[in-house]
Image (spheres, grey):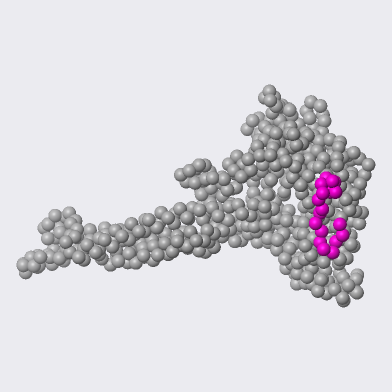
């Protein structure tokens, strides 16, 4: 005879009513309640703090919106397990006493009533807090803070994003959709992003991710759901002015300011503001292309659909192409990302960062040849860069101190009298080295080519990486199938550099070529006469007003 049955019979023989096992209050439910209270308190605090701090740190966000809600849920599950175990024991006791196995919860006593109320209160409170933290958790997992928690893996992308024009835009608005939620618009994109996120998290946990992280163009979402959420295709951007301040590699580090205008406009084929095809026409026209590689840096065929539905075709004479038009499955409709492919994560080049340091006085521009020597020490010269070689160089003791040695060997007087300026330049180069190279991810400024530019000839190039084809993937490369005419808008000959070539010590070269010819930079850019616009390029306090000889109306 079982122990429970013997105890029940003993109590009955003694004339006592057996005390039923309490279903709700038992050691297991008490432990579960304590666990749930800890999670409930932590998640509730995070929920309240979240409304006061819209951008919590990664640690706060993960603890408050991920860990603590799961602790509260675990506590509720433990409590439920305790109730089930209590019910099972009560049923066994009833069976031993020869009574019905049905579980009866007596609410007549204060102890029983307190247990039921406590269980219900903790359970309902946990579910309410879980609902609130789930909402905030979804928001948090789409933030830049959360995406950057994998420090080593995403460091190149996060640091480049923080200095990019879209630094204030959350990752999900570009990598998922401008508006996406589990119950709202773009549900498919949202679910796919979460599935991809779990796959990426597993790769991080198992150390099986790519180095560097791949950025295939095919993985970028449709720009109708991303870019155009903020930048409508029909918006009139007019003529956009851009100021460029570059420094030559001569002894004087000659400053070359340039003011260019871009015919951005509305994207329509013809516009009242510009003649010809404005820049945004490429993303609004039915322009199809095929590429020969995953990075889409080599274009083999382009077809522009006209109003009658026919295609005006252009081909690359350097790339063999099968007879006839490419199959529809091989064509890619041109979109914003085909040019703006690194708009959110551009790793700057040594040349650009040294120019910026010279422009803002972080490197003294009066130090002879400081631009040339700085770019050289940063690995910016030559045909390319190797992240492993650069990492080894940068980690060598005294690598950037070679700048001081250069002045000691060639300009001893400057080395003796201008040590603070030289030291400041060395310190700045050490900072720049951390912006252009990420050795753990084998990534540098050459890893992800930027299509929003175009290559320069070898005689003009001052830094490795200035040979990305960009615009010239098509312009100056493709020829019309019917007429054999080259697609206009390239360089050399009648191009931009025939008028505006910049080389060490030569200044701005103004040639006799008419820049209004179609085969010139003015097909995309419009050089502006600074004085005619009533504008002045801002210079440092120690620099005189720039020469405007090179600025003219087309």
- Residue 459 x, y percent position in the rendering: 88, 51
The residue at 28%/67% (across/down) is 27
Task: State the residue lying farthest toward the right.
Answer: 512
- Residue 87 x, y percent position in the rendering: 22, 58
Q: Quadrant of residue 58?
A: bottom right
Q: Is residue 245 visible?
A: yes
The residue at 58%/48% (across/down) is 173
Q: Is residue 382 visible?
A: no
On screen, 467 above or below 116? above
Q: Main secondary structure of the magenta part?
A: loop
The residue at 84%/46% (across/down) is 532
Q: Which residues are magenta?
A: 528-545
On screen, 58 above or below 456? below
- Residue 136 x, y percent position in the rendering: 47, 55
Classify residue 287 as left or right of residue 417: left
Task: State the residue lying farthest toward the front.
Answer: 534
* Residue 543 falls inside the magenta stretch: yes
Quadrant including the N terminus: bottom left
Classify residue 504 as left or right of residue 420: right
- Residue 482 x, y percent position in the rendering: 79, 26
**Residue toward you, 263 or 58:** 263
Task: State the residue lying farthest toward the bottom.
Answer: 416
Task: State the residue lying farthest toward the top.
Answer: 308
**Residue toward you, 330 or 141:** 141
On screen, 144 above or below 30? above
* Residue 277 falls inside the magenta stretch: no
């Amino acid at each position: 005879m079982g122990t429970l049955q013997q105890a029940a019979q003993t109590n009955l023989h003694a004339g006592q009513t057996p005390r039923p096992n309490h279903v709700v209050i038992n050691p297991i439910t008490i432990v579960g309640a304590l666990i749930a209270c800890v999670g409930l308190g932590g998640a509730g605090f995070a929920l309240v703090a979240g409304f006061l701090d819209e951008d919590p740190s990664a640690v706060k966000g993960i603890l408050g919106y991920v860990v603590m809600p799961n602790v509260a849920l675990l506590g509720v599950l433990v409590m439920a397990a305790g109730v089930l175990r209590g019910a099972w024991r009560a049923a066994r006791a009833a069976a031993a006493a020869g009574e019905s196995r049905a579980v009866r919860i007596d609410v007549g006593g204060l102890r029983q009533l307190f247990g039921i109320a406590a269980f219900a209160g903790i359970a309902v409170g946990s579910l309410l807090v879980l609902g609130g933290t789930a909402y905030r958790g979804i928001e948090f997992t789409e933030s830049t803070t959360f995406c950057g928690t994998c420090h080593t893996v995403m460091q190149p992308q996060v640091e480049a994003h923080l200095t990019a024009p879209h630094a204030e835009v959350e990752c999900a608005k570009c990598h998922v959709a401008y508006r996406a939620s589990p119950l709202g618009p773009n549900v498919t994109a949202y679910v796919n992003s979460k599935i991809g996120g779990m796959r990426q998290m597993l790769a991080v946990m198992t150390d099986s991710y790519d180095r560097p992280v791949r950025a295939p163009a095919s993985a970028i979402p449709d720009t109708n759901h991303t870019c155009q959420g903020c930048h409508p295709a029909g918006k009139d951007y007019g003529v956009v002015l851009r100021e460029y301040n570059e420094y030559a590699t001569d002894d004087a580090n000659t400053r070359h300011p340039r003011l260019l205008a871009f015919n951005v406009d509305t994207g329509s084929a013809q516009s009242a503001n510009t003649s010809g095809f404005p820049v945004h026409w490429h993303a609004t026209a039915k322009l199809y292309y095929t590429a020969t590689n995953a990075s889409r840096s080599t274009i083999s065929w382009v077809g522009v659909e006209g109003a009658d539905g026919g295609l005006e075709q252009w081909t690359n004479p350097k790339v063999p192409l099968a007879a006839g038009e490419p199959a529809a499955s091989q064509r890619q409709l041109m979109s914003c990302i085909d040019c703006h492919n690194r708009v959110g994560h551009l790793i700057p080049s040594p040349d650009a960062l040294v120019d910026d340091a010279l422009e803002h006085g972080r490197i003294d521009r009066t130090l002879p040849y400081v631009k040339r020597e700085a770019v050289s020490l940063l690995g910016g010269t030559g045909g390319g860069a190797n992240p492993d070689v650069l990492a080894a160089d940068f980690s060598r003791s005294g690598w950037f101190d070679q700048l001081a040695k250069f002045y000691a060997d060639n300009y001893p007087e400057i080395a003796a009298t201008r040590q603070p300026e030289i030291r400041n330049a060395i310190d700045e180069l050490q900072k720049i080295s951390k912006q252009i190279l990420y050795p753990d991810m084998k990534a540098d400024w050459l890893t992800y080519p930027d299509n929003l530019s175009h290559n320069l000839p070898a005689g003009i190039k001052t830094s490795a990486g200035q040979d990305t084809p960009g615009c010239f993937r098509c312009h100056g490369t493709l020829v019309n199938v019917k007429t054999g005419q080259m697609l206009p808008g390239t360089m050399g000959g009648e191009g931009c550099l025939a008028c505006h070539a910049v080389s060490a010590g030569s200044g701005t070269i103004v040639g006799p070529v008419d820049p209004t010819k179609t085969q010139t930079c003015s097909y995309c850019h419009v050089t502006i006469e600074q004085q005619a616009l009533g504008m002045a390029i801002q210079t440092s306090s120690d620099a005189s007003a720039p020469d405007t000889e090179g600025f003219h109306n087309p």
